[in-house]
Image (tube, grey):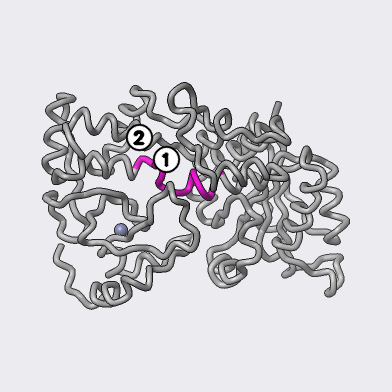
Amino acid sequence: MTLSGIFIDDNDDEAVYAEQMTTRGELKIVHERPRSLTVHSNDIFSRKPDLLALDYRLDEDLGDLDDNEAYKAGAMAQQLRDLAIDAPEGDFPIVLVSSEDKIRDQYEPDKTSHDLFDALYVKSEVNDDKDPVRRELISLCNGYILLKSQLGNFDLVTLTGLEGDDADLLDYQELTLPMSNAAAPHIAAGLLLNQLIHRSGPLIGINEACARFGVDLNHDERISALLVQRSADYRGIFSTGWPRFWSHLVDDLADEVFGKRATGFTAAERAEKLSATLDEPFEAASSTWTKKPDELIAFACACCGEGTEMRHSAGVFESSLPSFSKRRRVCWRCIHDDRYLEIRPSITMDDSDEDLVNAVKAMEFPG
Ligand SMILES: [Zn+2]
């Protein structure tokens, strides 16, 4: 059965994004103009879509609406989230799809609406990167369907596909307690996405995995295949939209190959060892700052995603970091070039590294 979605935008010229987000045979998205807020919200909820996508500003071309009926995406999302608390069986994912400048200048400062959306897409990204965006949207729909099948008893172990000895891997009270208290699928989905999928902790992305093996990101598909072969890939909820790997299984493989804690070797040493073990060539990750492969590459930069070493990076401020995840860091190159100011969702560097950040900005780039 084809999943159904609705895209609301007050600009008819932008209706084309409904088609851009549609995956033939899997998810059909139709465009609608905003109508009177409560009437439209109730109508959408009663139609039980699998997904709702909202442009941020729904008040620029009011059409038949009066000036005092103007509203933005957050207001509609809030009404729908409230309806879902009372009737969680009708819950569905809500994503924001808007232009870069509106997200930066208007949505970002409006912190009250941030928890309302499952994902955030810049329209140019929907255009240029259709396939991953479409996969994520379908993954959100299917994730919510799975969550709705567990109403009243969201079970982290079955949702994430943990089995046997690993069943207690996510047994952290800060995760299990809010999951068991979640009143609706969107609350459980928010927890899983924000605490687990979008952080490096028990799960990591391919960039982080490449950094742990000390290899260049151009080997991402090969490393990914290797980890899948080892059953180290995450197969639980939202995994089709956001491919992840179990961190402990990645480390097990690294231990096997390198014999001891992998990040104690330079990237060049690890790449050489991996190449010998697998009998195929791997190029070492080079420091984004020195451009040399003789650094202790240990993690992926939170900005560019490339392998980065502790001594040429600075910490990101994390307002609520779960005990089971790692604080993000940004490489000196991204700081020097102000790239870290451009990423979305935005990040703020940690105050304790303020002097370092200012010093790096003033440095001559050595690479
Ligand atoms: Zn970087």
Number of on-image labels:
2
Q: Residue at x 47, y 48 (%)?
A: 198
* Percent of width and height locating residue 147: 66, 35
Q: In which quarter of the image is the N terminus?
A: top right
Span highlighted in magenta in the image: 192-206
Q: What residue type is labelled 1?
A: Pro
Answer with the quarter of the image where residue 39 lies: bottom right
Q: Which of 320 and 236 is in front in this view?
A: 320
Q: Does the residue labelled 2 lie within 8 Å of ligand 1?
A: no
Q: Which amino acid does label 2 sit on?
A: His
Disc 2 residue crowd, few under 14, some 14–19, many 20+, Cα 10 Å: some
In the image, is residue 346 part of the stretch drawn in magenta?
no
Q: Mark 1 points at which residue?
A: 202
Q: Is mark 1 within 8 Å of ligand 1?
A: no
* Percent of width and height locating residue 361: 26, 74
Give SS at disc 1.
loop
Q: Which of marks 1 and 2 is nearer the N terminus?
A: 1
| Image marks 1 and 2: residues in contact by CB distance under 8 Å | yes
* Percent of width and height locating residue 180: 65, 40
Disc 1 residue crowd, few under 14, some 14–19, many 20+, Cα 10 Å: some
Label of residue 248 in the image: 2
Q: Quadrant of the C terminus?
A: bottom left
Q: Residue at x 60, y 44 (%)?
A: 177
The CA span between labels 1 and 2 is 7 Å
Label of residue 156 in the image: none
Q: Is residue 67 left or right of residue 10?
A: right
Vertical position of residue 116 compared to residue 103: above or below: above
* Percent of width and height locating residue 345: 49, 60
Q: In this view, does 167 lie to the left or right of 206?
A: right
Give SS at disc 2.
helix
Where's ligand 1: which quadrant?
A: bottom left
